[in-house]
Every structure is written in structure tokens, then in C-alpha cells.
Image: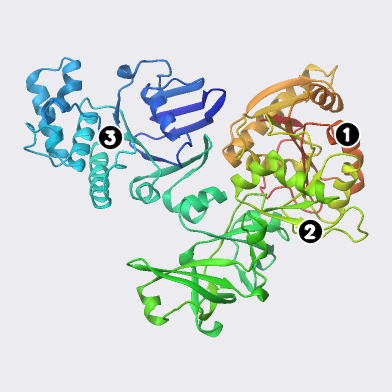
Amino acid sequence: MSIQFERITKRYHNASVVNDLTLEIATGEFFVLLGPSGSGKSTLLRAVAGLTSIDEGRIHLHGRDVTHLPPRERGVGFVFQHYALFQNMTVADNIEFALRVRRMRAAERRRRRKELLKLVALEGYDDRLPSQLSGGQQQRVAVARALAHEPAVLLLDEPFGALDAKIRVELRRALREVQQRLGTTTILVTHDQEEAFALGDRIGVMHMGRLLETGRPEQLYRQPATRFVASFLGAANFVLGELTPDGLRIGAATLPHEGAEGASREGREVVAVIRPEELELAERKELLESEWIGDAVVREVSFSGATERVVVQLARDTGVRSAATDERQANERPVMEITRHAGERLGLRLAPGQNVSLGVRRAHVLPTPISSFVVAARSADSRTALLEAPLMQQLTRSMRARVTVLEGDFAANTEPPRVHHAGVVVVASGPGAIADVARLAAAGARRILCIPAAAGLPERVLVHCLSDAARSSTLGLLASVMRHLHVEATLVCLQARGASRAERAAAFRRMLDTRAALQAAHGLDVRTDVHIGELSGFTRELDTRGECALVVVGSDASPSELQNLLAEHFSVLFTADSRCPVLVAVEDRQRPAHTSHEQEPRTSVWSST
């Protein structure tokens, strides 16, 4: 590998701007770091160059540890957004500057300069000053200067951000050609999705200091793993669907569902991503070439050159449920965005107010186990407190997840709460909270979050599987939560006092196996630690310290057994004055915990994040 990041963390004023990041970039690869402003991508790039120190982790370039080396000894070239050319030097002097510092002979400097000017299509510009060049030409000079000393790695920090659209396209093409010809390992930082798609062999999407996903451009666009990546890489319609034996059900449509994981999530609510180009419009459903999901009314039509953007609102009786973030949007008729090309526009002219039938060609199911949040409160005050809890605010805002509310006192109602298809059901900690969890589990809820009034944002997350059968789904839930909290991860193995050496060794191996499984399945790297003692003692110590930690508990027990287990091991965390929210993951016993033919190692671990 050309570049290796090992658990990189960088903090400013105790806030992590790069959070426990691990990544490998192959020799000759063009890797694009994509993300919104403040996601940590430029900080990571400057850390590679040696312009910013890191607080934790290691950086390797071509097998050499450069973590503590000064910039000039790392062998990298850096191109900034605003050129950073020496304004009093000619193009020739700018390009040769790094070569002069390295005491290269004059004849060799001239040869290298002419070679580079030809490469960036600026032959004959040697004697011009930067002020005599256009913005695009100045950036070409900056690229040539960065490549002058033949760096092993080229770093580009939003190099086209200050240029107009046409010049950006031309420079992208030129840069890609130069990079492929030289085979230089390159990292580009940008917030421009089109730029990332055009240049990257692979793309890594960063958010809140974390590397959420990496993959080929088409893979990330068509098969994202998170709502954030799906929406950041282009327009996306999010709807709630259900996995059935026949496929993915969205409204009246049932679409094929590919992937082995579908079987283990059958009958569960999922979030489906439908790209605008995967939707079809027709005057009536018989004319559709795709699966009809319902009728709709055209609300907006806008011309965008080669394409047309159409916004429609579905009828009330379609059965399509929006995955919109706020409750008001979620309760309204879903609004969908469609992209149509020239042929489709000619076949059906549209105008606002027109009635149409809507079909879907393809939908992608997000693998996240958290599809939505349902607040089940005993009173109006409790409902308000849950909706305003810092953890709920953080998760729903970052996940962009739908939030709905069960009206009335669900605990006093003799009818079972309607939570079978819910993503995460949220209740308040306090008297009766453990019984509430058991009742919700009996009603079909599979993920239940208990939040005490005193809980703030978690400082870490602890996860424990009460049974091996719940291990896979619980770790998947951990990985999903981890993407949205600014905390670090540690797998903690609990060992009983008096355990033999063989038992301790076996427990340690299980912990390492769990860490490896988490990395392989979810790309989540975690720390490891070992604690001696009983589970109930560990939770009492946690409560005594007054620490704010999110505790994730996985189990395949029946509702009554689950109630007893929670009361035995976790009762102190369900009190009204606890500071620890508890997220319970319930695995159906009749379902396989995973689909692999390979036996998973047995494990009993905590993970603290």
C-alpha cells in the first residue's frame, strides 16, 4: 500500500475533528476525500503533508512511518486551493523552486521544468509572472510545481474551488491525464460530488470526523450504506418499506431484493433509497414499464438543460410512507423527485396540477438497522423531554431519520402498542422502564432506546451481548450508531474473578475475533481492553461514576426472560436519575443471527465507544 492511516485522531480544544480513522490507499490510486465543510478532510490531508500534527495514530507512506517527520522529508507534493504561487517569480522559477532547494543542477532543473510545462499544456509560458496568467493557468503551474521533485504522493486540497465551471471541467480532465501518465498516488479533497465522480478511482465520504464509507464511485452512488452518503452523493428519495418473502414492498409495488441479508430482516421495516432517475411517470398505470407504486399530482416542473426535474406528491391511499426527518413531513403525503431525459419529456408533457401514475424501476435498501424512531411516552411532558433529549437530537439530525409519536399513555393502554414495524422505539427511563421494554418486545419491537432525563450526549458507548445469537445484529447496531456520535470505540472483555488461565486466554481470543468481525463486516476499528468482575458490578460502577455512556444490550431472550436479565444486570441504569441511556437489541430466536455458513466465534464482550 502507498498510504496507510492507522487510527488517526486529531483534536482541537478537546473536540475530535478527525476521529479514529483507518484507511489504506493503493500505489498509483486516485483517491478522493469527499465531505461537507468541517468534516475533517482537509485536516487529514494536511496531516499527511506534515503541516498538521496528529494526536493519536500513525501515518505510513510507501511502508515508511512518517508520523513525526517534517514536511520536506515526506516526499509529497501539495496543491492548495488558492495556488500559493510566488507572485514575484516567473513560471520557470516557481516550478524550479523545490529543485533549487534540493540543489539540483541547472541543466537538470531546466529539463524537468520543460517536461512538466509540456505535461500541463503550458509550453512557452516560462517567463510569465503569475499575474499574467488566468486562474486555470495558475493552477496548472501549481500542479507542475508540486510534481517537480517527483513526489511519491500528490495532495490536492480543493484545487479547483476558485475557478469557474468550464475551467474546472478542463482542469479535471488534464489532471486525471497527468496522474494516470505518471502513476502518482493522489489524494484529492473536495466537497463537489461531480468532481469526485469524474476523478476518483475510489471515494471516501467523511462526516463529523469519521470516514463513513469508501468504494468505487458507482458503488457508493448505487449502493450506499447510510442516509448521509446517499443524500450527499446526489438527489435521493427516502421511503420506508418492508422486506417480504416476495421482495421489497413499497406501497403497491413489490421489487426484487438482492443480497443475502434480506432473509434475516424479513418482515422488518427498512429504509429504501430511490434515485430520481429510477422513477417513471405515465398518464395511467397501464402505460408504465416499471412497477406502479401509486398515483400522484405534479407539483413542480423545472428545466435543467439535458434533463427535467419533476416534483410530485403521492395520493393519500398509496401506502407509501416517507422517511422524512421531521414528524410534520412524515405525516403528509410523500413528495418524490423525478429526473427525466429528453426522450421521456417528449413522450409525456407535464404541467403543475396534472395527475400522473408513478412507477419505480429500482430501489436500494440501506443496510442500517435503524430505519426510524417512534416515541412511546407516558405523558405529554415525557414526550417533549424525549424529543428534546441531546442523544435523540443528535441521532435524528445526523441520521436524517423519521420520528413519529405514539399518542396517549402507551403503558396504560390495554392494547399492544403498534410497534411491530418500528425502527427504534424510544421510552423514558424510570420506574417501570424495564417492564416497558419487555412489553414493547412482546409487541414486536426489536430495538428499544431508554433515555433518562439526566442523560446528555454520551461520552462513550458500551455494548454487550447477553447471548451469542444476538451478536451479529448487535454489532451491526453498534456500527450504525457509531457513525453518528463523536466518540471513540473500545471492545472491553469482562472476565469472572478466579477464571483459569485457559478461560482468560479464550475470552481474550473471543474479544480479538469480535474486533476482527466488526472491522470486516462494518469497517469499524475499535480499541480493546479487559475488565475483571461481574456484569452487574460493572454497571453499578458505571452508575456510581456518574458517567454518561450509551449502553447497547443484545439478547435473543423471550420478553419475560429479557425483563429478568435486565433487572438482574442493568437495573441501576434504568432509574430516573441514571445518566446512561440504554439501547436494547432483541433478536428473534427463530431467525438466524447471520447468513454465513461459517460458524462465528462465541463471544461475550463489551465495546466502549
What is the spatial separation of the Cα atoms under label 1 and label 2, in whole angstroms?
25 Å
Residue for badge 2? 420
In the image, farthest residue toward the front? 381
Proximity of marks 2 and 3: CB atoms separated by less than 8 Å: no
Residue 558 showing in the rendered view: no
Residue 293 is situated, as x and y percent measured from the top left of the image, at 60, 73
Residue 216 showing in the rendered view: yes
| Mark 1 neighbour class, 10 Å CA radius: few under 14, some 14 to 19, many 20 or more | some
Q: Secondary structure at mark 1?
A: helix
Position above or below: 533 against 35: above
Residue for badge 3? 82
Placement of the N terminus among the 4 image quadrants: top left
Quadrant of res 184: top left
Q: Could you say which is closer to the camera, residue 556 or residue 251?
A: 251
| Mark 2 neighbour class, 10 Å CA radius: few under 14, some 14 to 19, many 20 or more | some
Residue 230 is situated, as x and y percent measured from the top left of the image, at 52, 52
Residue type marked 3: His
Proximity of marks 1 and 3: CB atoms separated by less than 8 Å: no
Residue 187 is situated, as x and y percent measured from the top left of the image, at 36, 36
What is the spatial separation of the Cα atoms under label 2 and label 3, in whole angstroms?
55 Å
Q: Secondary structure at mark 2?
A: loop
Q: Residue at the spot x=46%, y=51% of the render?
A: 233
Residue for badge 1? 571
Position above or below: 57 against 267: above
Q: Which callout, 2 or 3, points at the residue further toward the start of the chain?
A: 3
Q: Residue at the spot x=65%, y=66% of the render?
A: 332
Residue type marked 1: Ser
| Mark 3 neighbour class, 10 Å CA radius: few under 14, some 14 to 19, many 20 or more | some
Q: Is residue 268 left or right of residue 204?
A: right
Q: Is residue 105 left or right of residue 39?
A: left
